[in-house]
Amino acid sequence: MNKLEKKLREKEKNFIGFLTGGDPSLEKLQLMVKALEDGGCDVIEIGVPFSDPLADGPIIQSAGQRAIERGVNLKSIFDEISKFRDDVKVPLVFLIYYNSIYNYGVKEFVKKCEEVGIDGLIIPDLPYEEQEEMLQYLDQEKVALIPFATPTSNERMKKTLSKGSGFVYTVSSLGVTGRESDFYRDFEKYIEKVKKYSDIPVAVGFGISNPEDVKKIYEYVDNVIVGTAIVKKIHETDGDYESVKNYIKKLLNS
Protein backbone atom coordinates (compact mmCIF):
# COMPACT_ATOMS: atom_id res chain seq x y z
CA MET A 1 0.00 0.00 0.00
CA ASN A 2 1.45 3.37 -0.99
CA LYS A 3 1.83 6.34 1.36
CA LEU A 4 -1.16 8.17 -0.12
CA GLU A 5 -3.66 5.36 0.34
CA LYS A 6 -2.26 4.56 3.78
CA LYS A 7 -2.79 8.17 4.86
CA LEU A 8 -6.41 8.19 3.70
CA ARG A 9 -7.13 5.00 5.63
CA GLU A 10 -5.71 6.32 8.92
CA LYS A 11 -8.86 8.19 9.91
CA GLU A 12 -12.51 8.32 8.94
CA LYS A 13 -12.78 11.75 7.28
CA ASN A 14 -10.07 13.35 5.15
CA PHE A 15 -9.76 16.70 3.40
CA ILE A 16 -7.76 17.14 0.21
CA GLY A 17 -6.82 20.70 -0.72
CA PHE A 18 -5.57 22.00 -4.06
CA LEU A 19 -3.35 24.93 -4.92
CA THR A 20 -1.71 26.11 -8.12
CA GLY A 21 2.07 25.84 -8.07
CA GLY A 22 3.58 29.29 -8.56
CA ASP A 23 0.54 31.40 -7.72
CA PRO A 24 0.85 33.96 -6.22
CA SER A 25 4.58 33.20 -6.61
CA LEU A 26 6.95 30.26 -6.64
CA GLU A 27 8.61 31.68 -3.54
CA LYS A 28 5.31 31.38 -1.64
CA LEU A 29 4.71 27.75 -2.58
CA GLN A 30 6.19 26.46 0.67
CA LEU A 31 4.15 28.95 2.71
CA MET A 32 0.91 27.98 0.95
CA VAL A 33 1.59 24.26 1.39
CA LYS A 34 2.18 24.94 5.09
CA ALA A 35 -1.05 26.97 5.31
CA LEU A 36 -3.02 24.09 3.83
CA GLU A 37 -1.34 21.53 6.06
CA ASP A 38 -1.73 23.62 9.21
CA GLY A 39 -5.34 24.36 8.30
CA GLY A 40 -6.18 20.66 8.32
CA CYS A 41 -5.50 19.23 4.85
CA ASP A 42 -4.66 15.54 4.96
CA VAL A 43 -3.41 15.52 1.37
CA ILE A 44 -2.31 18.46 -0.79
CA GLU A 45 -2.64 18.60 -4.56
CA ILE A 46 -0.25 20.91 -6.40
CA GLY A 47 -1.41 21.94 -9.85
CA VAL A 48 1.39 22.22 -12.40
CA PRO A 49 0.55 25.23 -14.62
CA PHE A 50 -0.32 24.35 -18.21
CA SER A 51 -1.43 26.49 -21.14
CA ASP A 52 -4.49 24.40 -22.02
CA PRO A 53 -5.90 22.89 -18.80
CA LEU A 54 -9.02 21.16 -20.11
CA ALA A 55 -10.44 20.14 -16.72
CA ASP A 56 -9.98 23.50 -15.02
CA GLY A 57 -12.48 26.31 -14.69
CA PRO A 58 -11.63 30.00 -15.16
CA ILE A 59 -10.26 30.64 -11.65
CA ILE A 60 -7.70 27.85 -11.79
CA GLN A 61 -6.96 28.65 -15.43
CA SER A 62 -6.18 32.23 -14.46
CA ALA A 63 -3.95 31.11 -11.59
CA GLY A 64 -2.03 28.85 -13.94
CA GLN A 65 -1.65 31.59 -16.52
CA ARG A 66 -0.31 34.00 -13.91
CA ALA A 67 2.25 31.41 -12.88
CA ILE A 68 3.27 30.73 -16.47
CA GLU A 69 3.75 34.45 -17.08
CA ARG A 70 6.13 34.49 -14.11
CA GLY A 71 8.19 31.73 -15.70
CA VAL A 72 6.98 28.90 -13.48
CA ASN A 73 7.29 25.44 -15.01
CA LEU A 74 7.56 21.80 -13.96
CA LYS A 75 11.31 21.97 -13.37
CA SER A 76 11.08 25.04 -11.15
CA ILE A 77 8.26 23.45 -9.15
CA PHE A 78 10.31 20.30 -8.63
CA ASP A 79 13.26 22.43 -7.50
CA GLU A 80 11.12 24.41 -5.05
CA ILE A 81 9.41 21.36 -3.54
CA SER A 82 12.77 19.66 -3.01
CA LYS A 83 13.73 22.51 -0.66
CA PHE A 84 10.88 21.91 1.79
CA ARG A 85 9.50 18.42 1.18
CA ASP A 86 11.09 16.97 4.31
CA ASP A 87 9.21 19.51 6.43
CA VAL A 88 5.78 18.50 5.07
CA LYS A 89 4.18 15.52 6.79
CA VAL A 90 1.18 14.99 4.49
CA PRO A 91 1.25 13.35 1.05
CA LEU A 92 1.78 15.63 -1.94
CA VAL A 93 0.06 14.95 -5.26
CA PHE A 94 0.58 16.55 -8.65
CA LEU A 95 -2.33 17.49 -10.87
CA ILE A 96 -0.53 17.65 -14.17
CA TYR A 97 -1.34 17.42 -17.88
CA TYR A 98 0.39 14.75 -19.90
CA ASN A 99 2.07 17.11 -22.35
CA SER A 100 4.17 18.48 -19.47
CA ILE A 101 5.24 14.96 -18.54
CA TYR A 102 5.99 14.05 -22.15
CA ASN A 103 8.12 17.14 -22.68
CA TYR A 104 10.05 16.48 -19.47
CA GLY A 105 10.54 12.83 -20.40
CA VAL A 106 8.24 10.20 -18.91
CA LYS A 107 10.94 8.02 -17.35
CA GLU A 108 12.82 11.06 -16.04
CA PHE A 109 9.61 12.55 -14.66
CA VAL A 110 8.71 9.44 -12.68
CA LYS A 111 12.24 9.22 -11.29
CA LYS A 112 12.13 12.87 -10.25
CA CYS A 113 8.76 12.40 -8.53
CA GLU A 114 10.27 9.59 -6.46
CA GLU A 115 13.35 11.67 -5.63
CA VAL A 116 11.40 14.77 -4.61
CA GLY A 117 8.64 12.95 -2.74
CA ILE A 118 5.54 13.25 -4.91
CA ASP A 119 3.14 10.58 -3.71
CA GLY A 120 0.53 10.58 -6.46
CA LEU A 121 -0.36 11.81 -9.93
CA ILE A 122 -3.66 13.09 -11.28
CA ILE A 123 -3.44 13.31 -15.08
CA PRO A 124 -6.82 14.44 -16.49
CA ASP A 125 -5.90 14.02 -20.15
CA LEU A 126 -4.31 10.56 -19.94
CA PRO A 127 -6.95 8.05 -21.08
CA TYR A 128 -6.98 4.50 -19.83
CA GLU A 129 -5.84 3.20 -23.21
CA GLU A 130 -2.63 5.26 -23.02
CA GLN A 131 -1.73 4.65 -19.38
CA GLU A 132 0.86 2.01 -20.16
CA GLU A 133 3.19 4.82 -21.24
CA MET A 134 3.29 5.83 -17.57
CA LEU A 135 2.85 2.46 -15.90
CA GLN A 136 5.91 0.93 -17.54
CA TYR A 137 8.03 3.25 -15.38
CA LEU A 138 5.75 3.75 -12.39
CA ASP A 139 6.03 1.82 -9.14
CA GLN A 140 2.63 2.54 -7.62
CA GLU A 141 3.91 1.58 -4.17
CA LYS A 142 5.91 4.81 -4.45
CA VAL A 143 3.87 7.06 -6.76
CA ALA A 144 0.15 6.38 -7.21
CA LEU A 145 -1.57 6.88 -10.56
CA ILE A 146 -4.92 8.23 -9.42
CA PRO A 147 -7.89 7.14 -11.56
CA PHE A 148 -10.93 9.24 -12.45
CA ALA A 149 -14.60 8.37 -12.19
CA THR A 150 -17.22 10.59 -13.79
CA PRO A 151 -21.02 10.49 -13.96
CA THR A 152 -20.75 9.51 -17.63
CA SER A 153 -18.19 6.69 -17.17
CA ASN A 154 -20.90 4.00 -17.27
CA GLU A 155 -19.57 0.76 -18.74
CA ARG A 156 -16.00 2.11 -18.88
CA MET A 157 -15.80 2.61 -15.13
CA LYS A 158 -14.82 -0.94 -14.23
CA LYS A 159 -11.92 -0.77 -16.67
CA THR A 160 -10.74 2.75 -15.88
CA LEU A 161 -10.60 2.06 -12.14
CA SER A 162 -8.76 -1.26 -12.47
CA LYS A 163 -5.17 0.04 -12.63
CA GLY A 164 -5.28 3.07 -10.37
CA SER A 165 -4.12 3.46 -6.80
CA GLY A 166 -4.09 6.04 -4.00
CA PHE A 167 -7.71 7.12 -4.33
CA VAL A 168 -10.43 7.46 -6.93
CA TYR A 169 -10.87 11.07 -8.01
CA THR A 170 -14.63 11.08 -8.31
CA VAL A 171 -16.05 14.00 -10.24
CA SER A 172 -19.21 15.19 -8.49
CA SER A 173 -20.87 16.79 -11.51
CA LEU A 174 -20.49 17.39 -15.21
CA GLY A 175 -18.27 20.20 -16.50
CA VAL A 176 -15.07 21.80 -15.24
CA THR A 177 -13.82 22.76 -11.80
CA GLY A 178 -15.20 25.78 -10.01
CA ARG A 179 -18.87 25.45 -10.91
CA GLU A 180 -21.54 26.36 -8.40
CA SER A 181 -22.70 23.41 -6.31
CA ASP A 182 -24.90 21.26 -8.56
CA PHE A 183 -24.33 17.68 -7.65
CA TYR A 184 -25.28 14.87 -9.96
CA ARG A 185 -28.88 14.02 -9.24
CA ASP A 186 -28.30 10.27 -8.81
CA PHE A 187 -25.28 10.89 -6.63
CA GLU A 188 -25.85 8.09 -4.13
CA LYS A 189 -26.19 5.44 -6.84
CA TYR A 190 -23.19 6.89 -8.62
CA ILE A 191 -20.99 6.60 -5.51
CA GLU A 192 -22.21 3.05 -4.89
CA LYS A 193 -21.11 2.18 -8.43
CA VAL A 194 -17.66 3.67 -7.91
CA LYS A 195 -17.19 1.72 -4.68
CA LYS A 196 -18.36 -1.45 -6.42
CA TYR A 197 -15.57 -1.23 -8.98
CA SER A 198 -12.74 -0.08 -6.73
CA ASP A 199 -11.55 -0.93 -3.23
CA ILE A 200 -9.26 2.09 -2.84
CA PRO A 201 -10.51 5.23 -1.04
CA VAL A 202 -13.06 7.35 -2.90
CA ALA A 203 -12.61 11.13 -2.95
CA VAL A 204 -15.12 13.58 -4.42
CA GLY A 205 -14.24 16.90 -6.03
CA PHE A 206 -15.56 19.58 -8.46
CA GLY A 207 -18.04 22.22 -7.33
CA ILE A 208 -17.35 21.93 -3.60
CA SER A 209 -16.93 25.45 -2.29
CA ASN A 210 -18.29 25.89 1.24
CA PRO A 211 -18.63 24.08 4.58
CA GLU A 212 -22.15 22.94 3.69
CA ASP A 213 -20.89 21.23 0.53
CA VAL A 214 -18.10 19.52 2.47
CA LYS A 215 -20.54 18.28 5.11
CA LYS A 216 -22.91 17.03 2.42
CA ILE A 217 -20.23 15.04 0.61
CA TYR A 218 -19.04 13.46 3.87
CA GLU A 219 -22.43 11.79 4.09
CA TYR A 220 -21.43 9.64 1.10
CA VAL A 221 -17.63 9.35 1.12
CA ASP A 222 -14.73 9.80 3.54
CA ASN A 223 -12.61 12.08 1.38
CA VAL A 224 -13.47 15.53 0.01
CA ILE A 225 -11.45 17.59 -2.50
CA VAL A 226 -11.64 21.40 -2.65
CA GLY A 227 -9.67 23.30 -5.27
CA THR A 228 -11.16 26.40 -6.88
CA ALA A 229 -12.34 27.97 -3.63
CA ILE A 230 -8.85 27.64 -2.12
CA VAL A 231 -7.13 28.99 -5.24
CA LYS A 232 -9.50 31.96 -5.16
CA LYS A 233 -8.73 32.65 -1.49
CA ILE A 234 -4.98 32.44 -2.12
CA HIS A 235 -5.29 34.97 -4.96
CA GLU A 236 -7.54 37.33 -3.01
CA THR A 237 -5.14 37.42 -0.06
CA ASP A 238 -1.92 37.36 -2.13
CA GLY A 239 -0.96 34.19 -0.34
CA ASP A 240 -1.41 35.35 3.23
CA TYR A 241 -0.62 32.39 5.50
CA GLU A 242 -3.09 33.13 8.30
CA SER A 243 -5.95 33.92 5.93
CA VAL A 244 -5.49 30.75 3.92
CA LYS A 245 -4.98 28.54 6.99
CA ASN A 246 -8.10 29.92 8.65
CA TYR A 247 -10.09 29.49 5.44
CA ILE A 248 -9.26 25.76 5.41
CA LYS A 249 -10.34 25.54 9.04
CA LYS A 250 -13.59 27.27 8.13
CA LEU A 251 -14.28 24.79 5.33
CA LEU A 252 -13.76 22.02 7.84
CA ASN A 253 -15.78 23.76 10.56
CA SER A 254 -12.80 23.35 12.86
Image (cartoon, rainbow, N blue to C red):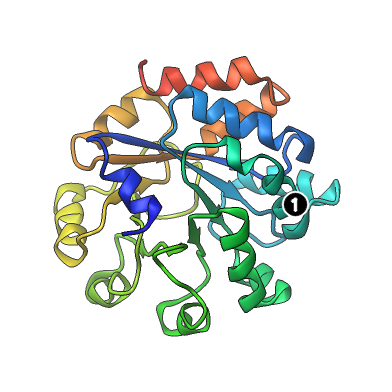
Left or right: residue 208 versus residue 109 is: left
Left or right: residue 131 versus residue 67 is: left
Task: Report the residue marked by disc 1.
Answer: 79
The residue under the point 71% across, 43% down is 83
Q: Nearer the viewer, residue 87 or 120?
A: 87
The residue under the point 29% across, 60% down is 151
Q: Where is residue 26 in the image (x, y as percent from the top left)?
A: 77, 41
The residue under the point 33% across, 30% down is 213
Q: Position of residue 90 (x, y in %)?
A: 46, 39
Q: Position of residue 194 (x, y in %)?
A: 21, 60
At mark 1, the secondary structure is helix
Q: Where is residue 173 in the image (x, y as percent from the top left)?
A: 35, 50
Q: Nearer the viewer, residue 234 or 207?
A: 234
Screen quadrant of the C terminus: top left
The answer, for residue 62, to whether it is visible in the render is no
Left or right: residue 21 versus residue 156 is: right
Q: What residue type is labelled 1?
A: Asp
The answer, for residue 65, to whether it is visible in the render is yes
Q: Which residue lies furthest to the right in this view?
A: 70
Q: Nearer the viewer, residue 39 or 89?
A: 89
The residue under the point 64% across, 43% down is 20
